[in-house]
Structure formats: C-alpha cells, structure tokens
Amino acid sequence: MTTDRREMKRRSGGQQLLDFFFFPLRAVTLFHDDRWGLSCLASERFDYVAREVRGQCLDVGCGRHNRFLMDYRGGNGQGIDIFAYEGLAPENIVPDLTQLPFADATFDSVTFIANLNHCPEPDRDAELRDSWRVLKPGGNIIITMGHPVAEILVHKLVWAYDKIFRTNYDMDNERGMHEDEDYYLLDGEILDRLARAKFVKVRKKYFVTQWGLNHLFVGWKPEDEGAVVGRANAETR
Ligand SMILES: C[S@@+](CC[C@H](N)C(=O)[O-])C[C@H]1O[C@@H](n2cnc3c(N)ncnc32)[C@H](O)[C@@H]1O
C-alpha cells in the first residue's frame, strides 16, 4: 500500500509559531533542510501546497529529486521538468511543457511550485492551457509565487551563497536562465493567465509563517465545463 507521507511532514501549531517568529533567520540563512528545530523555506512551501493537492498530482517543473511528490505526496503522481536534474529519471524529463505527454483528464491536481516565472513568457498561456487539458473536471491547479522583493533577494542571495561557500543550491543557475524568464510574476499576470486558461474560483492564500511574503493561487477546472462555456457565451450576447 502506498503511504501518504504528506501527513508525516504536516507541521504542528507549535512548529508553525516557532517558524513564524524565526522567519528572518530562516530567510537569510537559506538552509535547504529543516534544522535547529526550524523549517526550511522550501519544505514549508511544499507543506502549504500539499494542503491543497488531492489524488494524482502532476508537478510541473519539479526540480531535483522530484522532492514534492516523493516527500509530500507519497509518490502519488508524476513530476516533470525540462532539465535533467540530479535524482530525476528519464520519464521525469519533458523538453516541451506546452505539450504534456499525458491523456486528457489524467490528474486531480497540477502544481507549479516556485516556477511559473521560469516558464518563458511566450509559453506561459500554453503551459496553463495544457495543464487544464490533463486535469480531470473538478480538479485544481496550484501556483506558488513570492513577493517581488523577496523573489529578487532570494535569487541573488542563493547565487551569492553558492559562489562564496562553493555549494550548489541554485537550481536556476545550474540550468541557466533563459532571457524570457522572470524573477517573479505579479498577481495580475497570474490571474489573467489563469482566467484565459478557463480556471475558475481562483483564490490567493498567503504563507503566514513566511510573513505573507510568499503565497499561492488555487484555481479550479469546473465539474461541468460545458456549463461554463455556455454561461460565458450567454454573457457576451
Ligand atoms: C526555482 S526551481 C523550483 C523547483 C521545484 N518546483 C521546487 O519548488 O523546489 C524552478 C524550476 O522551474 C523549472 N522550469 C524550467 N522551465 C520551466 C517551464 N517552462 N515551465 C515550468 N517549469 C520550468 C526549472 O527547471 C526548475 O526546476
């Protein structure tokens, strides 16, 4: 039986309080695993996303070791990335994320964790459209994004940290950022793109333990897609 390790990683109320008070320390030290009794920002981000995910999940731009699905969803789903990071198998590598190699209505959730800004600007609508296609009716999409100032600082800090301490934390530097990528996306762009891809009931949720400097959007593919198209047509008449 597959165990859902998400529950193992769920943080207690006391832990969340500690993480909230020590957020500045966690942010500047940039450690990549939980330590000193504190959560690292990455694992905490996965924890927030795991609360929104259901059933079979497609994690687009999964990064090294397919960490979200393996550690937070008990391997329940498929992680894919354009780059052959350490810990990824050939089936995890999909060079063109605008044409996902999955049948219509395969997944219950699709996640873009800290990466829609890394999708080249001309491809963003197409990736979201194809995410809609592979989602089951009633499924959801989750997109995380940091506050612009936090995103710029974290990108620069990780880059500098790797240079000074000869570590290799910076996944974007390892892959090499494309000129059409961005350090962050503003809410308006994400909301407009989600609407164009036909997602409905989109809600923004802040990461409280990161002082609201990180957040996620959850949008839904309606159970009855025909009803939404019908309503949209009626409204434009
Ligand atoms: C900052 S890393 C985040 C990785 C992982 N999701 C996490 O939270 O640790 C950005 C990821 O975006 C991926 N990426 C690159 N091009 C992408 C695209 N067109 N669409 C989605 N993700 C992409 C990168 O390969 C990288 O794995």
Image: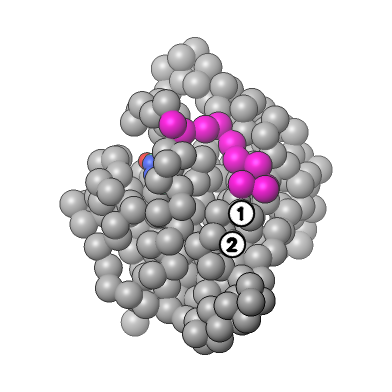
Considering the numbered disc 2 on the image, is that residue within a helix, a strand or a loop?
helix
Which amino acid lies under the numbered mark 2 shown in the image of this protein?
A: Ala
How dense is the environment of label 2, judged by Cα within 10 Å: few (below 14), some, or many (20 and up)? some
Seen at 73% across and 54% down, the residue is: 206
- Residue 63 higher or lower than 91, as above or below: above
Q: What residue appears at the point 36 percent right and 26 percent down from the top-left corner?
A: 176
Query: In which quadrant of the rendered image does the N terminus lie?
Result: bottom left
Dot 2 corresponds to which residue? 195
In percent of the image, x 69 and y 64: which residue is there? Answer: 203
Which of 217/174 is in front?
217
Ligand 1 resides in the quarter of the picture at top left
In what quadrant of the picture does the C terminus appear? bottom right
Residue 139 or residue 48, whichever sits in front: 139
Label drawn at residue 231: none
CA distance for labels 1 and 2:
5 Å
Residue 95: image location, x then y, percent: 25, 46
> Do we see residue 71 in this rendering?
no
Position in image of residue 11 (x %, y %): 65, 61
Residue 140 on the magenta segment: no
- Circle 1 residue: 192
Tags 1 and 2 in contact by the CB under 8 Å rule? yes
- In this view, the residue farthest toward the left is 90
The quarter of the picture where residue 129 lies is bottom left
Q: Label 1 sits on what residue type?
A: Asp
Q: Nearer the viewer, residue 234 or 88?
A: 234
- Range drawn in magenta: 180-189
Where residue 41 sits in the image (x, y, percent)? Answer: 61, 43
Residue 83 horizontal side relative to residue 182, left or right: left
The extreme top residue here reads 164
With 199 as the anchor, is 135 left or right in this view? left
Report whether residue 108 is seen. yes
- Is disc 1 placed on a helix, strand or loop? helix
